[in-house]
Amino acid sequence: MAEVKLKGTWPSPFSYRVIWALKLKDIPYEYIEEDLSNKSPMLLQYNPVHKMIPVLVHGGKPIFESAVILQYIEEVWPQNPLLPNDPYERAVARVDPHFSRTSPLDRWRLFRTTAGEEQEKAKKESLEMLRALEEHGLGDKKFFGGDKIGIADIAFGGVAHWLEVIEDLVGVKLIEAHIFPRLHAWTKNFKRVPIIKENLPDYSEMLLYLKREGITF
Amino acid sequence: MGEENKVTLYGMWASPFVRRVEITLKIKGIPYEYVEEDLRNKSQLLLQYNPVHKKVPVLVHNGKPIAESLVILEYIEETWKNGPKILPEDPYERAKVRFWASFIQQQLFDSLVSAAKSSGEAHEKAMKEVFEKLTVFEEGMKDFFPSGTPHFEDENIGFLDIVLCSLFGHHKAQEEALGLKIIDPERHPLVYSWVTALNEVPAVKESLPPHDKMVALIQFLRRNAPHRSSEA
């Protein structure tokens, strides 16, 4: 099999999405930690457009954007599928990766905006979307993917673990157990999945990092 | 049309996201019913079909709703297997197409929207970004069109073509509304000739919003958007 390399950065949730997908499918890869403050020539060569990570390099060919990478991995390595077979089910599953990247729930921008009115508005929009996810996305299922985790769980998983740290940092709680019981339960269940559990950035280290660097991802 | 295989598209005439679904349905020869939504007064059906985002487009197929334009395009590709394909077969080529589609949407178009909603210094900065990104795009596209000017016989347009023309097909209206050139044939000849060629494809031409109506809408949105004139 052609060589797989993942260029990522700790503790970016977008890198972790790809790590989880690769591990869930048991795909051997080489991980290269990229120091964002000192971009390597290799990174610039492969990703002149975004100058961002993660980048997956398969047989020397680079693929950018975590959502695009996830789809690529699914298509090239169909074992342990992350997407269902049925086109409609797939469409439903695919909405969420877009969602967690581009929506007002994009928690990074939420807490980066100035406090006061703008933050209140961002919080209100986030809560509305969480409500919709709680009722329509999860419904009665354990995971977005059903009984097992799928692409939507992986995409949203970045939000779950990282959101907790940010909530801690900023003092604004979004996913409260009594308001979003299903989502709250989902965050616990997701982090219990062995491959996820073994591949999460350390909570206190992240808290220290975010305090020092601000929210860089 | 019987209930089986019934396709309904909930949309709005000016939305580029709706337009790309329409173009795709036409290219594939899929019959559909179109329902125009008043976005200031959304129908109950729309809210029921898209509770998460409450946005158009929503495609309803056999009573089941699908939201998010790019997801809808992939759904159409996977469900109607006869007829022209809009995505390449090879996963790496597909990844390239998806990446650039995301770039056009998230980088290029979003910068343009920021520019439209701002004035003064913020507007200048946003437009500068648009041009920088157009240049990046122009360079990236030389890979796709090694022989230069794109041609589209028999409506053989694909995912990236559809995303591009849905967002920039009406660039002349955008340019008139904003009073500046966005896709300049001197600065970005490949993108310019590409968009121009796409606008001749019947499915694209039919879906182009009326010029004057579009100019008026953009100007209206520009006047009424919360304005930022300096770097906040």
Image (cartoon, coloured by chain):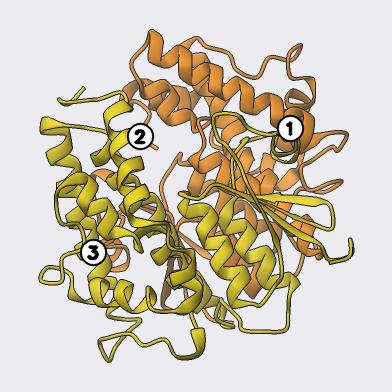
Chain colours: A orange, B yellow
Q: Amino acid at mark 3?
A: Val
Q: Residue at x 34, y 34 (%)?
A: B221
Report whether mark 3 lies on the same chain as mark 1: yes
Q: Where on the picture, by quarter, is residue B21?
A: bottom right
Share a chain, discs 3 and 2? Answer: no
Work out whether A216 lies above or below B94.
above
Element type at marker 3? helix
Task: Determine which residue is flagged by label 1.
Answer: B44
Residue A61, which numbered label? none
Find residue B73 and report its horizontal and vertical position in percent. Answer: 61, 64
**Chain designation of label 3:** B
Left or right, residue B40 beside residue A187: left
**According to the image, label 2 marks what residue?**
A216
SS assignment at label 2: loop
Q: Nearer the viewer, residue A134 or B56?
A: B56
Q: Position of residue B142 (x, y in %)?
A: 27, 80
Image x and y of residue A172, in percent? 52, 11
Q: Indicate the chain on which mark 1 is placed.
A: B
Instruction: Tell me the residue that label 3 is attached to.
Output: B136
**Is residue A189 something that shows in the picture?**
no
Q: Can you tell which of label 3 and label 1 is closer to the viewer?
A: 1
- For the residues labelled 3 and 1, the Cα–Cα distance comes to 42 Å
Towards the viewer: B8 or B212 = B212
Q: Amino acid at mark 2?
A: Thr
Would residue A83 appear left or right of A163 to someone viewing this image? right
Q: Label 1 near label 3: C-beta < 8 Å?
A: no
- Chain letter belonging to callout 2: A
The amino acid beneath tag 1 is Gln
Front-most of residues A50 and B172? B172
The residue sitting at 18% across, 56% down in the picture is B132
Q: Quadrant of residue B138?
A: bottom left
